[in-house]
Amino acid sequence: MTELRQEDTTKITERCFQGEPASCSHGCPFFFDIRTFLLRAKEGKWGLAYKLYRNAVVFPGIVSKLCGAPCRAECQRGFVPGEGEDEGRDAPVDVRAIEAAVCAYAKDQRPVSYRIPPKDKRVAVIGAGLGGLAAALGLAQKGYGVTIFRCGGEPEDALTQFQDEIDLQFSAVEITWEDGAGISETDAWPKDFDAVLKTKGDGSSVLPLARQQEPSPFVFSIGGTGPISSLAAGIAVVNDVEAWLMTNGAAGATSPGSKAPRPQKHYLDHPGEARLPLIAAADPAQGYTKEEAIAEAQRCMGCDCRKCFDVCEMLMAFGKHPQKIAVEAYADTKAVPPFSSCSLTRETYSCNLCGKCKEVCPVGIDLRELFALAREGRAETGKHPKAYHDFWLRDFAWHRGEGAYAALTEAGYVFFPGCKLGERMPAQVEKAAALLKEEYGAGILLDCCGAPAYWAGETALFEEHLNKIRAVWESAARPTFVFACAYCQRIFAERLPEIAGVSLYELLTQAEGSSLSASSPSALVFDPCAAAGFPAMRAAVRGLAAHAGVVTEDLPEAEAFRCCGFGGHMRLANPDLYESIAVHRAAAGAEKYLVYCANCADAFDLAGKENVHILDLVLGVPASAGMTGETAGMAGGLGARRAGAVRTKDALMQLYEGTPFVPEAKPWDQITLTIPQTLLGEMDGRLITEEDLKEAIYTAEKTGDRFFDGDVYQCSLAGSVITVWVQYRQGDHGNYDYAIIDAWSHRMHIEADV
């Protein structure tokens, strides 16, 4: 990987519009944040709502009466259709009526007094219409000396009814008012000002007029075809004038089009949104009561995209927008250790890398790609918490080393069961391999797809492993891989697209040798997150279940393809979130689950959710066993998983070569342990294996490097990242038998003072 740049992360989220103004703001002449304003109103926070409104429109008491409310044409509440006999669409939110209520109920409406030192530049505003008044007020608040020349006429005369509002808003600034009746466009502009603002009222855009002969000041035009558009133009011109004054007329300071463009307008779908009728004021002349204004504001749907949040407990837990995550993901690769200097450590490694966010995002933002890149960048710079991945990478090393096995044929198929299915269901892997060998002449490749390295951000290791698999595939004349695991199939589809693949379940539907057994009458199919891209796999699983006599139903659409919690190694990075996700997925349906992912089955076992793997149904589970079978027997902890993997390799070697698998002997193999059942469960949660305890005790007994208190001993096993501790005493069955009292681990090494 080349050095990570900020644009590498931010380009992933650049199309995200979460947090941008809603469509109603695009209809507003002031581009007012109506969504936040209505949120404050629905909370009854009149003062906060008023401040937002006043900061946007300058003269809230005038705008709330004169504005034509073009925002309502963009209100998405007005897009919510009726159903059945309730035809038509909802009425848009009555924003202007709520604005009037806010003006009526906000107690403190005094303008803020900005204590800014006065500047030495002076500005003349010709015309006291709304545009001129807004520009004058804005510049005065910035400390410029402002003189307003009243010219009279219809725009100014129409404002006399709002004189109290004008006086209120100007009460915190000093303004000079003069009679401008003798000033016209053909006369010379005032000579003792640095800039002159003229209200044209002809609909022109806000542009600087040509500079007159020296020493005339620079002249700005305030366009607008009516009071509200003129007011908006007057607000907008303030920054142009200040830029001109601060740069002494530098080229481009007020050039047309220099302002940042508005974000794109977006409309969202609102599935399941209930229709809400417009709230009518009991007294139209008086306007909304507080209660009526709150009720009408509650009709606002918010209209901010949070689709990724809605399907991801991790994003909800941390509450950061994708754009912020992208910036911090890059910054973390530049942070100076320790990890506390990084912003996203726990969040980066709490992502399941499932890809559900991209599936639901209206513009296809892939946060899986972002978090994978963040992990890769941090691993590259040494700023990654190795402890989060140590157990899985050691397990990966065994599966790609001692646990790997290949027996290739020329039949055009090779069965790739993955590593976890063999750990959990060795007999079913053996039966599937035998069936594929008999029906299709398929070979076998027992290995891992490389997901642990990918999840850890260990790119070099991941690529090395993929190259190894590619070499095996090429040596076997490029057969089609048969996958039992959807995640394995996704890894291959994305990283080894040249390798053709098909799911095991598709072939089982065609195989004559599969022994289908009767079972329970119904189940909910839990589709793993990676199965979203493989409709044929999903259909085959349902077909096999139907053939086995099981009536299947799907989970609600909102729960489709959501991660069980296993993915991404989040179990150590964020155990509380992991447990929460597993519990949520388990609670998505009341009936037992039919699964076809071993990792999902593991997660549901830990969550106490009854489940059965599809292979239990189709490969020889006795009818009397119902929907349990070997899955339940092999869910006995981490020690059982390694034993299951050994059994799987042994069965496959017997099937293809007629020779057994003899695991590498270790000096602590002779040790036997007695472990309380409750402690076994705690060890699984801490990812401590019986093998770890045996090695620790063997080393301590051999070297004498241990603590003791009476007959209780305590020792440790220091790995490259994790140190495992164990308390034990001598057992009742010989010198190599030990009773375990407790076991724990931490990310700390203790150095002996020799």
Image (tube, helix red, strand yellow):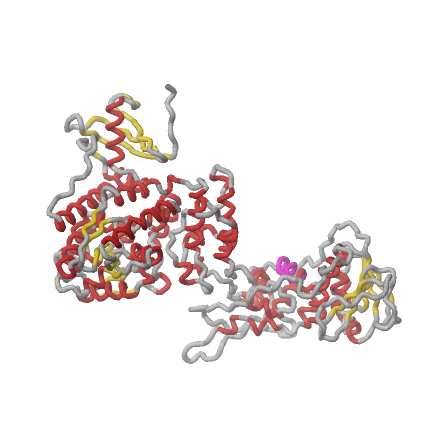
Q: What x and y, as percent, mark residue 397?
A: 29, 42
**Left or right of 336 in this view: 518:** left
| Camera sees residue 144 | yes
| The furthest residue to the left | 658
Q: Where is 172 relative to 535, above or below? A: above
What residue is at 75 percent from the left and 63 percent from the top?
135
Q: Where is 659 relative to 87, above or below? A: above
Closest to the observer, 704 or 504 = 504
Q: What x and y, as percent, mark residue 583?
A: 33, 52
**Left or right of 438 in this view: 456:** right
748 magenta-colored: no
Magenta segment's dominant SS is: helix
Residue 623 figure quarter: bottom left
Residue 40 figure quarter: bottom right
52 magenta-colored: yes
| The furthest residue to the top | 754
Q: How many marks?
A: 0
Closest to the observer, 177 or 658 = 658
What residue is at 66 percent from the left and 72 percent from the top?
67
State which quarter of the image contains the C terminus. top left
Q: What x and y, as percent, mark residue 415?
A: 21, 55
| The furthest residue to the right | 182
Q: What x and y, as percent, mark residue 367?
A: 44, 55
Q: Report the magenta residues as a range.
A: 46-54
Closest to the observer, 203 or 418 = 418
| Camera sees residue 587 | no
Q: Where is 467 relative to 435, above or below? A: above
